[in-house]
Amino acid sequence: MSLSAIAVAATTITTSRFPILSPSSPSSNLTATLTLLFTRHRSHRFRSRRPITTMAASSKPPPEQKITAPYGSWSSPITSDVVSGAAKGLGGTAVDSSGRLFWLESRPTESGRSVIVRGGSDEKGEAIDVTPKEFSVRTVAQEYGGGAFSIYGDSVVFSNYKDQRLYKQSVDSKDSPVALTPDYDGPVVSYADGVYDTSLNRYITVREDRRESSLNSITSIVSIELSDNVIQEPKVLVSGNDFYAFPRLDPKGKRLAWIEWSHPNMPWDRSELWVGYISDTGDVCKRVCVAGADPTIVESPTEPKWSDEGELFFVTDRKSGFWNLHKWVESDNTVASVYSLEAEFARPLWVFGMNSYEMIKEQKNLIACSYRQKGRSYLGVLDKKKGTLSVLQSPFTDLMNITSGVHCLYVEGASGVDPLSIAKVTLDDRTSNVVDFQIVWSSSPTSSEYKSYFSSPEFIEFPTEVPGEIAYAYYYPPTNPIYQASQEEKPPLLLKSHGGPTAEARGILNLNIQFWTSRGWAFVDVNYGGSTGYGRAFRERLLKRWGIVDVDDCCSCAKFLVDSGKADGERLCITGGSAGGYTTLAALAFKKTFKAGASLYGVADLKLLKEETHKFESRYMDNLVGGEKEFFERSPINFVDQFSCPIILFQGLEDKVVPPDQARKIYQALKAKGLPVALVEYEGEQHGFRKAENIKFTLEQQMVFFARLVGHFKVADDIVPIKIDNFD
């Protein structure tokens, strides 16, 4: 029986199980959301003196040639099949000793399987899968994973999704991967964020051990022998704290740097940077806290990295409240600023293995870096001796990781017309100008076919309910070269509340959003208080006020767009995944701004979430919410009588971040109240939907649900709607 047939027969729907890839950008977690990144394949080439421009949408027919039809009813070639089948995820990049590029690619069309891919030897060379078909490269450490593979020489060590064991494999031969870690009769021990120790022929990595408790795992830094055919129990090097990340070994193998933090903090609240000295036997024999231990300094150091000369660099937000680059002065154990700017040179540590800056191999004094300021990313070169920063031209307006290649950089980025891509960036001899910028991988090579339908994101600032404070958003107007609406009509608006909640909406090409705007919807992606990229002060607006500030900001944004004439106040809808799903439910329970909502694996009961979620986020809400009284007062499940509009809920049955009971409880309560409500459950789905079939179904059913209940128009697509309780 097809999904559509099942959907007609019952409100609750079950589909087949599949593996998924953990989020690689903050995008998500309580950050993972249904929205994925999509890109089109395009090669940018230019000389340094030529201004860089991004490709504009193709010319559109003048208004008098367009068909006049109601907003929301427009036909579009950006179908749900295009959206669900085109996007591939990216889980990091690496370069081997020969300078060849490797990346980790997740594939919705293969049920979310993740594969290490080796790039071609030149721009015409064919990319080759390194990972055998029976393997999928993904770690579930801290649920969100990241840092699932590492390359040294001609070898790769990776985490296999099914059993969570580490394996070693040659990147060139066809020999099967060899297991490095013990088999514990199940995926109960995970590894992430590893580095090679060539002097002692071992691999140093973060280990999460769930053998004793899945809700209270034990995290440590361990070493694993790399000798062939020898599987030993990993040796614990650093332990005792709640969490660890970024184990980084100096060039001589004598000092190990790492980040650690403890409950109730998240790594962006407070963390510590430590350095341990390695003995001849490989043990950490002496430890020094570099940053984070001084109670008078509020900071969250992250991303430590050693230069070839043995200097330790890292990013922290001490004093300014912005993540800037700093350096450790080992002689007197002090910290020196390398460069200060009201911008973020790092991202919140939702996933392992982030790499926001990189030492330029050919120029010892220079560091390639990315930073984010007012909703836009910039690529730069920082002179660590002079303390100067040179901004490089780049078509990307959104940057993630940077990997140093041979006489080049590999940059993960995107823009309003370029979704997630990898670009090879070649600099001139002085490393002050970009002489070549070539897209070498695109997560959606065919998306350029639809460029005339693309809606460009407009970065907006809007007033919040607090006088003098502003929040931010990306607004996407309805865009279609064939259709227009009458001048008297205002478009329906879908407002998206991002996950996290410590995360950020990013204005990049996303075919999920274009699916809506090309059909005549306005779409807005809100960066409410708590969003990253705007400094600690903006991020901490959410402390003790989650469910208030985020809800107020989303409502304020919707009202701002209505007052600006960009949206119909009677057709305001809201959606969000995970933490964004909580904001969606809270907005519908405590405000009357929106007329319908869609919650994707959203939180309805804060107390239940605290009791059942995984260790990484088990104390997160203490800082976000407060005490028992606040947990009750901000849980939508306790105020079902205040809901007054239709809601559709989507939930994965194996979600360990937001357990399925969250959706079931609110569904049953709303159904009993008599509101129009529908619940869709996916078998095997964890936090976020990565299977093409389920992405397609979720997208379609949201649109049809809104169209039937508040849209006042007929969707052009041939979609069979699911049964809506208290409506059908």
Image (spheres, rainbow, N blue to C red):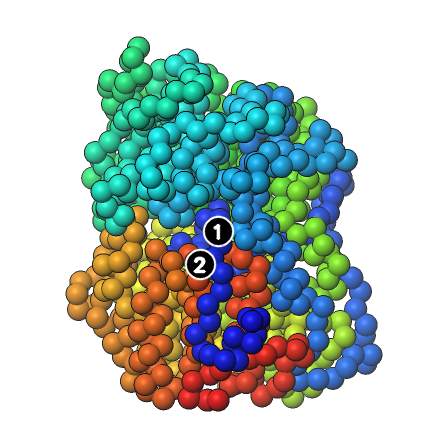
Q: How many marks?
A: 2
| Residue 394, horizontal then vertical, whole percent | 65, 43
Where 205 sits versus 362, above or below?
below
Q: Quadrant of the N terminus?
A: bottom right
Q: Mark 2 or 1 closer to N-term?
A: 1
Q: Nearer the viewer, residue 138 or 252?
A: 138
Residue at 45% over, 36% down:
159
Q: Quadrant of residue 658?
A: bottom left
* Left or right: 78 in relation to 206: right
Residue closest to the far front:
1
Q: Nearer the viewer, residue 159 or 356?
A: 159
Where 393 sits versus 595, above or below?
above
Amino acid, disc 1: Ile
Asked if residue 481 can be seen in this view, the reply is: yes
Q: Nearer the viewer, residue 625 or 652?
A: 652
Which residue is under mark 2? 685
* Left or right: 670 in relation to 289: right
| Residue 663, horizontal then vertical, whole percent | 36, 70
SS category of the residue bearing label 2? loop
Where 78 sits versus 669, above or below?
above
Q: Quadrant of residue 185?
A: top left
Decide: marks 2, 1 in contact (CB < 8 A)? Answer: yes
Q: Quadrant of residue 141?
A: top left
Q: Nearer the viewer, residue 495 or 719?
A: 719
Residue at 69% over, 42% down:
439
| Residue 26, horizontal then vertical, whole percent | 45, 50
Residue at 54% over, 47% down:
113
Which residue is under mark 1? 20
For label 2, the crowd category at 10 Å Cα-Cα, with few meaning under 14, some 14 to 19 and many 20 or more, is many
